[in-house]
Amino acid sequence: MRELISFFLKYNVLFVFILCETLCFYLLSTYNTYHRASAVASSNAITGSLFKMSNDVADYVGLKGENETLHNENARLRQLLFNQNSDELKRDTLVEPIEVTVDSVHLRSYVFTAAKVINNSTNGLYNNITINKGSKHGFKPDMGLVSANGVVGIIKNVSTNYSSAMSLLNKNLKLTAKIKQYTGSFAWDGMDARYAQLKEVPNHANIQKNDTISTSGYSSIFPENFMIGTIEDFELKEGSNFYDIKIKLATDFYKLRRVDGVENLNRKEQIELEYSTANE
């Protein structure tokens, strides 16, 4: 208590000055029209700035929810797009399935379910991706994984709440791709996360730089015509029957944040049929 009294005694002149200044401002703003208007204007400006700051913060915090909503809606739209030639689609997922009924001999149906990337390697030879959805969300091994821009990888292992996928940036991943009506084998050489290779495209194929490379539809994992990338460069070595094609990948793996799991509802039936035919 003695120290507090000593403090006030030591700085009594400063406290008296502050009190007088406060009283002067109060009298000026209360009894002088000009100063009162200036004070009100300043107060409004400060209040407006605080409200704007508060709204900006609220908008920023709300972006996460809006992004989730947009991501789910994009998954629904992809589902609709790749099921235009599907039989009636019935499946319970977090992304509500879109029922599509079209008369067609092509009965393959796909379900797209939104997920978020929580781990992603790009610097190794055998890169993998972990997402925040697992078996309780409908994810299974050998489902495809895509982004808004193109193919990402193939799911290999699933737990209750998480899934691990083999990235396109994995030397063990093999995929059949196509340019126009020609098919080839996709592979990654482990050198650059932006580029991959396409082999076994015949030398009579009419190809050019920037031609689109997409999924062939031969796989039971991905629907046909899903973007993989574009031709960055190509060459035909002397005496070779096939082009060496450099692909610029559509997916930027350095910025990968949101993906969709792709399930082919008829995959089991297709595999069983192909297996039985191969063993006849």
Image (cartoon, rainbow, N blue to C red):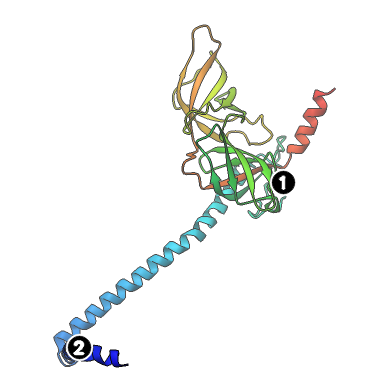
Q: Is residue 15 visible?
A: no
Q: Is residue 7 above or below residue 222?
A: below
Question: In the rendering, at what x and y percent does residue 230 appear?
Answer: 48, 29
- Give the foreground label among 2 and 1: 2
Q: Quadrant of residue 179?
A: top right
Between residues 36 and 196, which one lies in front from this camera angle? 196
Outermost residue toward the front in this view: 2
Dot 2: element: helix
State the quadrant of the C terminus: top right
Name the residue that disc number 2 marks.
10
Residue at x-position 63% and y-position 36%: 222
Secondary element at tag 1: loop
Q: Quadrant of residue 15?
A: bottom left
Q: Which mark is residue 88?
A: 1
CB under 8 Å between discs 2 and 1:
no
Q: Is residue 195 left or right of residue 167?
A: left
Quarter occupied by the N terminus: bottom left
Disc 2 residue type (three-letter): Lys
Q: Earlier in the sequence, mark 2 or mark 1?
A: 2
Horizontal side, residue 180 vs residue 93: left or right: left
Q: What amino acid is labelled 1 in the image?
A: Glu
Q: Which of 173/42 is in front?
A: 173
Residue 107 sits above or below residue 8 on the image: above
